[in-house]
Amino acid sequence: MKLGKHMGKAIVFTALMATAAQAETVVKVTLIDKVGIADLSKSMGLGMGMKADMKMAKMGININPKAVPHGNVKFNVTNLASNLVHEVIISRITDENQLLPYDQSRNRVDAEGIQTLGSVAEIDPSKSASLTLELKPGKYLLYCNVAGHYMAGMWTVIEVQ
Amino acid sequence: MSTLKTLISPLLTRRGLLAATAVTAAATLGAAPSVADEAKIDISKLPRVKQKMVTPPFLPEHEQVATGGPKIVEVTFTIEEKRIVIDNDGTEIWAFAYEGSVPGPMIVVHEGDYVELTLKNLATNAMEHNIDFHASTGALGGGALTKILPGEQTVLRWKAVKQGVFVYHCAPGDVMIPYHVVHGMNGAVMVLPRDGIKDGKGNSLKYDRAYYIGEQDFYIPRDDIGSYKKYETAGEDLAESLDVMRRLIPTHVVFNGKAGALTGENALKAKVGESVLFIHAQANRDSRPHLIGGHGDFVWETGSFADVPATGLETWFIRGGSAGAMMYKFRQPGIYAYVNHNLIEAVMLGATAHVKVDGEWNDDLMMQVRKAEPITG
């Protein structure tokens, strides 16, 4: 399968992004779905910089650790949702108060308006995939841009030191 | 960047189909005439009792012989994803625990009673959970009607139509089924005959104590130097756990969630002359309980109290995915070991419990005629 297909993509990506045999820091990323019967067709207003109560988040991304040294960072992503396909996009941000450009009609982050450093696409429920990026010091956003998911709280910030 | 995929319709997935089937079935039941309606009327008139769950190896307070007619027994399970220690070396796992314990608590009812379970999935949890009762009838043992995401709760009622001991476990779908079961998400139900258990010749059997041994196999991933890995959040270990599970060799086989959980200070207790009922549950893997220094006087190996119990057994077999029961009257004092008699699992992987029995020694049954001494002659 499906697993093979997605793993294949991720492995190719890893090969492209990783440089030589440098030490890499592993970050475990888990994708959480608590959406239940909530309506995702319109924005839930839980995006970055919106000062929303994130306890209300219906979806989420957990990372461990939350800060890493600069250099090669390997993101091992596991989708813990039982029905939903998710993705993880990684972009550099200035800080957590930054508001992302948002396409209201499609209920997604306007990916044209923010630089994407890498992504792991279409991770099926219960499946894992990985991505390695060489990251400079700064703050980076991990988010899912499936319609409605970002505004349901599906994002987190990692600090690279 | 590759294309973005919108969420797949739940109805197009296998799990979605199962859920849809179950919803249809439930809806039909509500609207159906005759039998279903009669059952409904009866149920509304039945007395309700709340059963307070207790932590294994103990059983909730219960009658061995039922007084009165069928009841609705109300039970609440709160699911908690929590880090637990599973051996004396500090090895950890993120357990998915019904009522916070591994194994989950035992429910005790009588045949014809109804179990009404309120199942809660804490908002702080990361995963969807549900419950499949092997003692129940329909909808994947209730699994299709009890799926709840973190922050949700649901209520399921089922009728106890089969007497015996049975396992229950989480079954959210696909690889999450074994993954949840080997993260401690299982327990047992005892459905007693209304007039109590019998010896197979019509004679009633009464136990003075009852203990519930939940056996659990764990599959803990190791790092490059062979040490067991630790994880900061629930679910982080999914991919690595599945790799270990796929090899079918457990790293731990324990009773009551931890190697040594039922030994030493925590040994089970009994007195000479007392009959003790041991319920042994294994939701995933075969086991072969043996009481070192005693026997199974009466053994319901497959768990059904409707069957004639086997008598005087040395070792009995518990099929993975089932529970069985054994009753033994202790005749000698001392420390007995209750083990899984694959002795590698008992001694090296953790599947040992102790029973500390007080009372008078019986020289007729056994005595040391001569102490150890140099060989003569």
Image (spheres, rainbow, N blue to C red):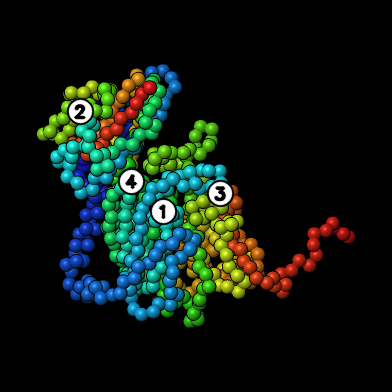
**Callout 1: few (<14), some (14-19), or many (20+) C-alpha neighbours within 10 Å?**
many
Residue B141 placed where, x, y %?
Answer: 32, 60
Residue at x 41%, y 75% (from the top left corner): B193
Viewer-nearest of labels 2 and 1? 2
Q: How far apart are marks 2 and 1 (CA)?
A: 40 Å
* Label 3 secondary element: loop
Disc 3 marks a residue whose amino acid type is Leu
User: Who comes first in sequence, dot 4 or dot 1?
Assistant: 1
Quarter holding the N terminus of chain B?
top left
Q: Distance between the residues labelled 4 and 2?
A: 27 Å
Q: Distance between the residues labelled 2 and 3?
A: 53 Å
- Specify the label residue B124 is tagged with: 4
**Please, which chain is the residue tagged with disc 2 on?**
A
Residue at x 51%, y 45% (from the top left corner): B251
Is B320 located above or below residue B241 in the figure?
below
Same chain for the residues at labels 2 and 1, yes or no? no
* Label 2 secondary element: loop
Relative side of B376 to B256, left or right: right
- Specify the label residue B100 is tagged with: 1
The quarter holding residue A64 reads top left
